Image (cartoon, grey):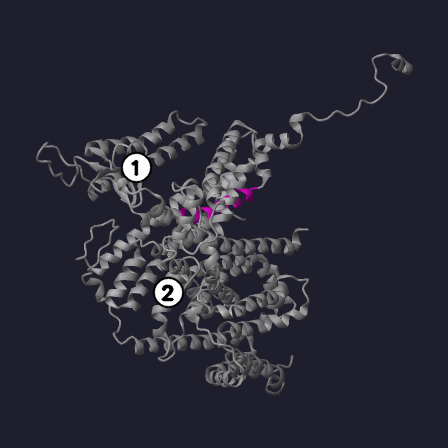
Amino acid sequence: MSDMNANRAFVRSDMLPEQAPPALETGVVKWLRENLFSSWINTILTLVSFALIYWVAQIIVPWAVFGIWDAGSLTECRAIRDELYGVSDGHGGGVACWAVIAERWPQIIFGFYPSDLYWRPILAFALFWVAITPVLFEGAPRQLLVVTVAFPFVAVALLWGNVGGPIAVALGFALGWAIYKFATPAIGQLAGTIATIVVPILYWILLSGYIGDGLSAILPGLEPVGSSRFGGFLLALVIGISCIVLSLPIGIMLALARQSDLFIINKSAVVFIEVFRGVPMIVWLFSASLLLGYFLPEGMDPDDLVRVIILITLFSAAYIAEVIRGGLAALPRGQYEGADSLGLDYWQSMRLIILPQALKISIPGIVSTFIGLFKDTTLVVFIGLLDPLKGLSDAIRATTEWNGIYWELFIFSGAIFFIFCFGMSQYSQYLERKLATDRR
Amino acid sequence: MATMTEPPSEVFRLSQLIYDTRYRSMTIQVVAFILIMSGLFYLGSNVAQNYERGFDFGFLGNRAGYDINQRLIEYTNDSTHGRAAIVGILNTLLVAVLGCITATIIGVLMGILRLSNNWIVAKLASAYVEGFRNVPLLLWILVIGAIMTEAMPQPRDFRGDDAEASMILGESVAFTNRGIYIPNVLFTRSLSGNEVDTETDAAIATASFADWAVILVVLVAGIVGSVIIGRRAQDIQDRTGVRPPGTFWQRLGVIVVPTAIVMLVLGATLDFPELRGFNFSGGIHLRNALIALWFALALYTGAFIAEIVRAGIMSVSKGQTEASYALGLRPSWTMNLVILPQALRVIIPPLISQFLNLTKNSSLAIAVGYMDVRATLGGITVNQTGRELEGIMLLGLFYLITSLTISGAMNIYNSSVKLKER
């Protein structure tokens, strides 16, 4: 019976060659059909989107592309434009005058920092990247941590040109470390810990000022630059970076305090956090510039930049405390109990078990707090510092050459902010993926 | 008899304060309390020494002497500083409410569009979200303010037969560089009485607080009635399985009809803005400061809300949708009964904290000169009276109370929708 089939003429004995898939189901056409025109409502949305993009592009692209890069003033810009493209704005409302960026970009970046000293902030910025490399990326050589520790002092010395002060302050840390290392075995754990905290503080209050002045007089100095000359992105970065660095440890302490069982400590942390979070940044900045003087003893009058850094640090510490508290609360109870049952004391269990996990969970929140902080540095303009968005663009607009120029300055500063903030958020996503060890 | 041993005598040693866990927490708290109190005392004594004028809130009753161009309640420069502060508070709340509503609409729309399977739409929504989230709010306020003042036509461009600019929406809305003019609702039979035009003997339309209060009361009553009808219909449906027919129309009608009747009785008319002389008059004038602040806040916060909405929708696992389809629920029921209740639990808490952020960010009004509470109480009043400490303290207190109220309400909501774990 089986060979009957073999003799039938209509049974195929060999395989057909594969056919190409239908044209509608391959390549670009398939992609277009699935992603742009899958239903009539999607088709409408697609067409509307393209119309929108075209409408925006036909205004902005010619304006930006035909922009004038080489002119000394806005009037000159307009004269060149009329000469090139005809008087009656041939390109839909004129062209950009990028010349203002070409001429004034150092001012937007550095503010009124002396131009022959630009190398100092640039060097500090380069060192900053070297300093944070070992913190950000695990693969970096550990020796770089030396730079990380020294960076805050070097940066202050470079930016303000004050060599003695940072060295004197750093001596305080060295003093604390020395006491912890050598005196503690002699006088006992408790007295040693207290001395480690109290002695450096006394040293900073009483002595470091004189030592700093003395060192500045002896050491070959850099030319001092006052805080009032800081401006633009230099100012934003100085405020942003110092507040980020200072607010993280304070925020962790506040979060631990708020999680604590100790009534007084807990309630003080709650009051501090809620008060700082409940009031907008601008009100804090006004407090810094108008009120801080009343709270400090007479004769102690920190300059505006220092006031701002103090207030923004406390402000963002309160936000970070809440983010980290979320992380602490999200940890399963067993982690705390496990740490206790191992016989670890409070600080050991926090340092070795709880915080590493809690901080890992809180990374996205911490980074978005930092992004918010960096964006908020622009608000210092309202107490008279020269931020890149409003302070400096107003200053540039106040000159006769560039009176009436808006968009070019906004686009330039906005683009730089975007790069920094977008970079930070991308890094946090990278970190989240890298640290997601429990998802594998 | 077992020999009784004396329990070791409890001799208190000073070192127990630190090494005995029973006493240690006490010690730490006492030390912390002393440190905090002495810190506060130090600050307080500095203030007492430096602020010689002493605390006095009497300035709130003095004549303010400055004008506020944007106000919701009666105010002249003869009013008190206290009233100026209230005008400012109302302005802050106005822009906050407008901003929250607009931001929610934009945010929900963009959050959904970002999840669209249409590539170009999803990309545009992503561009919006990333663009607005990664640039300071101040920039958007300045940009929208500059668009309003620099790119909009002047009122005189609307003049003449071949005017360069024209009003839109049937000659009812005018975009000018002095702000946007929109129609206003006025009443010809206002509750507080109308003046009468001497020539035509017709009542001049006006609007008073009483008119709007009556309309608001009727509207709220209508909404309450609508909720009651809805509850009743649900109850009947639960018992019998059949929803009473026409429930939707009843619910709509009980809101719309009484309100419409009241409006008719009061003789509601639209007052259109008109070009008179060099400027528009009539209608409502939305000043540039308000527009810039409102839309910048809405667009900026909308970007954050979009992310919250997206995360909320994505947090509901696909199995929920599939299970609901397997039960035979329609897509619209699946959305309403299965997906949204679960997504909202994730969305609402961060959404409310965004509203809180928006309210606090409205203090950026200073960038465009909108007269919010920071500008009146914390700005001009402080400058004129020299009462920095009191003024800024009251200002901070206002914001603090607002935030604590909102976050308190949020906590109550959170505990009511929390997953019931057993």
Residue A47 against residue A107 in the figure, above or below: above
User: What residue is shown at x 24% (from left), y 31% (from top)?
Assistant: B261
Q: Secondary structure at mark 2?
A: loop
Q: Amino acid at mark 2?
A: Gly
Q: Position of residue A388 (x, y in %)?
A: 44, 59
- The chain ID associated with circle 1 is B
Q: Which residues are magenta?
A: B297-316
Q: Position of residue A108 (x, y in %)?
A: 46, 60
**Extreme-bottom residue of the structure:** A186
Crowding at label 1, few (<14), some or many (≥20) Cα neighbours within 10 Å? Answer: some
Quadrant assignment for the N terminus of chain B: bottom right
Based on the picture, tell me whether residue B107 belongs to the magenta stretch. Answer: no
**Magenta-colored segment: predominant secondary structure:** helix
Q: Are marks 1 and 2 in contact (CB under 8 Å)?
A: no
Identify the residue under disc 2. A384
Identify the residue under disc 1. B173
Q: Position of residue A327 (x, y in %)?
A: 55, 58
